[in-house]
Image: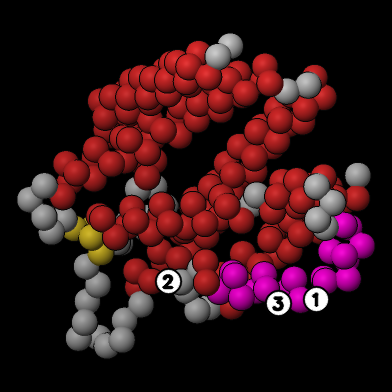
Amino acid sequence: MTFGDHLEELRGVIIRCMVVTLVLMCVAFVFKEEVFSIILRPKDDSLQLINTAVTGQFVMHMMVSFYVGLIGAMPYILYQLFHFIAPGLYKQERRLAMALIVSSYVMFALGVFFSYFVIFPFTLQFLGGYQVSGEVSNLISLESYIDTLTMLSLMLGVVFELPVVSWLLGRFGLISASQMRDYRRPALVGIVIAAAVITPTSDAFTLLLVSVPVYLLYELSILVVRK
């Protein structure tokens, strides 16, 4: 294939991915109640969300529909990208690329689930009920709620990529299992600091909820790099 043929093939991949994302976005837009029932499930019944802009709820509906469409289309997008680059790889490289893509997607999804079921509910409960004075009441906007959910999900998804990134760096010879074992203590300190940044709450329990799984991921990374 010529360079122009490759560009044409890439153009087809992009168009197909955009079409699938758009279709799933429309599906999510139609099933508004089902989608938002999932998004709002971590919210305590005592916490009332408000909207402060005329177009706020519609814009948020569109944005959430796009996110859902993109997440739903991600397996297809990854498959299309792999199908595009596969002809240029050797058989062993194709297997490694497929393993890297699948493991990255799985670990990111695990991070998002961990955020949704564990971290976000505790964060919302703490911050939603926090008051500097009894004279100041909390009115949480829908935009703030979804922004916090999105931020935590994205950050935990990226953090859970630690074993995959470690495996990749190990394949390139940039790190080794012995180096990671020697840096356990500094890594633990860094993990606690990162957990404090990820979780906007100041309680030790939530900090522990994030730090322990991430440290276990670090130990798992040592085993992955050693193989």
Choose between 105 and 30: the one closer to the eye.
105
Residue 145: in sight, yes or no? yes
Give the Cα separation between the discs numbered 2 and 1: 30 Å
Report the mark closest to the observer, 2 or 1: 1
Residue 14: image location, x then y, percent: 42, 23
Q: Is residue 174 left or right of residue 131?
A: right
Q: Give the number of the disc on residue 185.
A: 1
Give the Cα separation between the discs numbered 3 and 1: 6 Å
- Residue 184 in the magenta stretch? The answer is yes
Q: Residue at x 75, y 71 (%)?
A: 187
Query: Helix or strand or loop: what does disc 3 sit on?
Result: helix
13 shown above or below 58: above
Query: Split into 4 quadrants, where in the image is the C terminus?
Result: top right
**Picture quarter containing residue 138?**
bottom left
Q: Main secondary structure of the magenta part?
A: helix
Residue 40: image location, x then y, percent: 35, 48
**Label 1, residues with CA under 10 Å away: few <14, some 14-19, many ≥20:** few
Name the kind of residue labelled 2 in the image.
Answer: Phe
Report the mark closest to the observer, 2 or 3: 3
**Picture quarter containing residue 92?**
top right
Q: Give the number of the disc on residue 114.
A: none
The mark nearer the N terminus, 2 or 3, is 2
Asked if labels 1 and 3 touch by Cβ distance under 8 angstroms, the answer is yes
Name the kind of residue labelled 1 in the image.
Answer: Arg
Q: Is residue 3 left or right of residue 221?
A: left
| Magenta residue span | 176-196
Residue marked by disc 3: 189
How many numbered dots are placed on residues in this image? 3
Residue 150: image location, x then y, percent: 41, 52
Query: Split into 4 quadrants, where in the image is the N terminus?
Result: top right
Residue marked by disc 2: 126
